[in-house]
Amino acid sequence: MTDPIRLSKRLIELTGCSRREAELYIEGGWVTVDGEVVEQAQFKVADGQVVALLPGATPDAHEPMTLLLNQPAGLDFDAAQRLLSPDSRWPDDRAQVRLLRSHFARLTTTLALQPDASGLLVLTQDWRTLRKLNEDASKLEQEYVVEVSGEMAPNGLERLKRGLGDLPPVKASWQNETHLRFALKNPRPGVIKAFCKAVGLHVKSMKRIRIGGVPIGKVPAGQWRYLGQAERF
């Protein structure tokens, strides 16, 4: 019996690959230990454990991922991150992506939700996506559906579209008798509640359903999907 060794070292012994290639195989989810995928190069394996490469394995660095979470209201970023797991991926996600646990590491967000809002939150490992969202924040339209109560003041929609006092003009329309749609760019925190209050309405709930050209779609609250290859903010 010998002491357990690092998975990456065992893989080098088995395949003759380099240390970097071994790490890439493992991080890419291509290596199994006793039939279970292990993504940690430092994982310790004993003599009797079976280490194998999956068919089609390639020692390529995985692309940074962007995840779209339908965040429930009232969570901070840390709490939102804790919702992310293989089990909380939306079952109907059509993105052709091999799910890896490393996709949940080193995530960053931007374009925060309005206070007390639910809906689309972008979490990304991709610096290009993060830069796009930050640099184009003043150009990207964010769409919210807002449940309201009360009676709107006369000509309330027209007043919202023209601007009210220190509130800028905003695109607003009725979705149904109790829900308004707002489309606005880089909204400051609390501005949707201020819009509604200015025309006699009280906000009961609000949900962000779109940023630029990317909607959250039918993803249920607390679940997430990958940003599709053809989707663009």
Image (cartoon, rainbow, N blue to C red):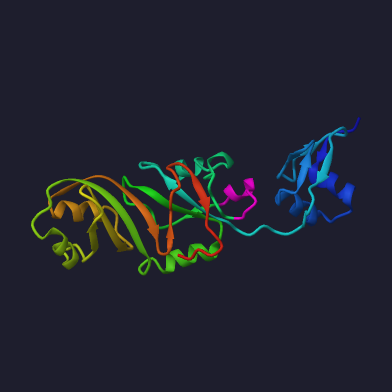
**Residue at the location (29% across, 58% down)?**
188
Residue 62 is covered by the magenta coloring: no
**Is residue 85 visible to us here?**
yes
Residue 103 part of the magenta segment: yes
Residue 34 place in picture, x, y as percent = 80, 35
Q: Is residue 159 left or right of residue 38?
A: left
For the point 84% across and 47% down, the residue is 11
Q: Which residue is most to the top? A: 1
In this rendering, the answer to whether 170 lies above or below 85 is below
Residue 76: image x %, image y %? 41, 44
* 25 sits left or right of 121 in the view: right
- Nearer the observer, 55 or 21: 55
Q: Position of residue 36 (x, y in %)?
A: 74, 38
Which corner quadrant of the image does residue 210 belong to?
A: bottom left
Numbered range of the magenta stretch: 96-106
Give the residue at x 39% y 49%: 119
Residue 75 placement (x, y as % from top left):
39, 42
